[in-house]
Amino acid sequence: MKTPANDNDHTTSITASPAVWLAEGQSSQRDMLASLQILKAQSETAFNIIASHRHNRPEIFEFADSIYREPSISTADSDEQAMLESAEPLMPRWQFVLEQAQKNNVKVLLTGRNGIDYEAHREAFDAAGIRLLTGATSVAALETIDDKFAFMQQCHQYDVPVAEAWRFDNVAELEALLDIHGHQPLCVKPVTGIFAQGFWRLGKVKEMGQEAGTETDEQYDSFEHLYFTEEKKINTTQFINAYANSVMVRERPIPMLLMPYLSGQEYSIDVVCEYGEVLAAVTRYKTGKIQHIGYEQSVMDVVIPLIKTFGCDGIVSVQTKADDDGQHRVLEINSRPSGGIDYTTHSGVDLTQVGFAYWLGLTDKPILVDIAQQITPCQVRSIMVGVKVEEDIAE
């Protein structure tokens, strides 16, 4: 039976059964809860499944045994003025979750999108006997992972094959970088961000052997990049002009990266890991609308040392792309499950179930070699599902 909670009533019944808690995530919380319900139905050991979110998300909550509304105002997701105007004393999200987790005998907590907030208080969760899964085991590691430039520099330091990147904070820095690197296909993206927000491929600026000061911007159609936005291609001159004249950038500076555009296949890798050790993983790449699911060893040869380097812990996702020579290079780590983790269920290896069954003590520690042998390569197409949402007067 679900135990709903709202901002004014955070109580719930104390249960003797162990519980797992999935806090607010980016995009995969619903699918992971559904997988946990299947695991629970198949398990001989009873456990409860708790979900929380700061918004009313019935399509998520329907797969949980108990639900909580996380504090809607916090330093992580609201501005200082709103906090000052709040009529009630504000409880940090991590503290609220910890208190309710202790009441509900929670043994495993996946923090989702707010990992750094929780990670800063790991000792408190350890003391409560809660296995905290934030994607890493230190605030410093999570901050480096979120900062794509710092992340890439650390990869270089530890000889992990990684894409090259040059940071710029203004137009002058960008133009100076283009003078040096403009002879090759390039792209730009923000230093921090998700879902490919702010990513654009640039036209070639300078041909090899050209005299300094002469430019032959590859003519990406001026209208085409507005019409086919999913192609993420833009004329370099237009990008510079937009960046230089952006009110948004002036009001809120956005550090950016200039990078070589890698021509090879891009992979997304879902990884179950513990203290830097890969326990299970599934690789996938996309052609058109089709996801190709499997286990690519050449990709994993890059992922395994990467996970060790950053001490990743929990369920994370990695993006790689091959260069012109076919060498797989790391693009980034997301310190939380990917939106496509549910695709792994079609391969015969449900990574959500593999991870949580182990952390709950239902199974022995997964062994990567054994898990890889259980994967059946397959193709997956995602579909859209509609869910009716009733009006939420709390919002």
Image: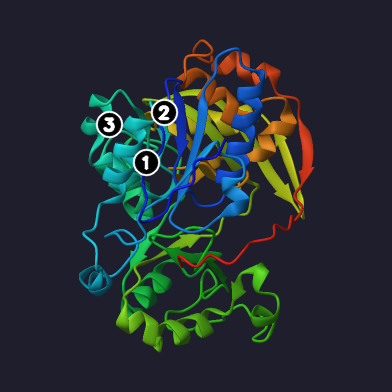
Q: Which mark is residue 108?
A: 2
Task: Check whether the beta carbons of the residues at disc 2 and disc 3 lie within 8 A of each other.
Answer: no
For the residues marked 1 and 3, what is the alpha-carbon distance in whole angstroms? 30 Å
For the residues marked 2 and 3, what is the alpha-carbon distance in whole angstroms? 10 Å
Q: What residue is pinned by disc 3?
A: 125
Identify the element where label 3 is drawn.
helix
Residue drawn where x is 64% and y is 82% of the image: 226
202, 359: nearer the viewer: 359
> Taking 326 as reference, is 205 left or right?
left
List x then y, in percent, for residue 139.
26, 42
* Up/down of 37 relative to 237, above or below: above
Residue drawn where x is 68% and y is 17% of the image: 373
- Tell me the amino acid under the disc marked 2: Val
List x then y, in percent, for residue 117.
29, 47
Q: What residue is pinned by disc 1?
A: 155
67, 229: nearer the viewer: 67
Q: Is the residue marked by circle 3 packed among few (<14), some (14-19), or many (20+) residues within 10 Å?
A: many
Q: Nearer the viewer, mark 1 or mark 3?
A: 3
* Up/down of 118 relative to 357, above or below: below
Identify the element where label 2 is drawn.
strand
Task: Check whether the beta carbons of the residues at disc 1 and disc 2 lie within 8 A of each other.
Answer: no
Residue drawn where x is 56% and y is 46% of the image: 61
* Up/down of 85 relative to 349, above or below: below
Q: In which quadrant of the rendered image does the N terminus lie?
A: top right
What is the quadrant of residue 384 in the picture? bottom right
260, 254: nearer the viewer: 254
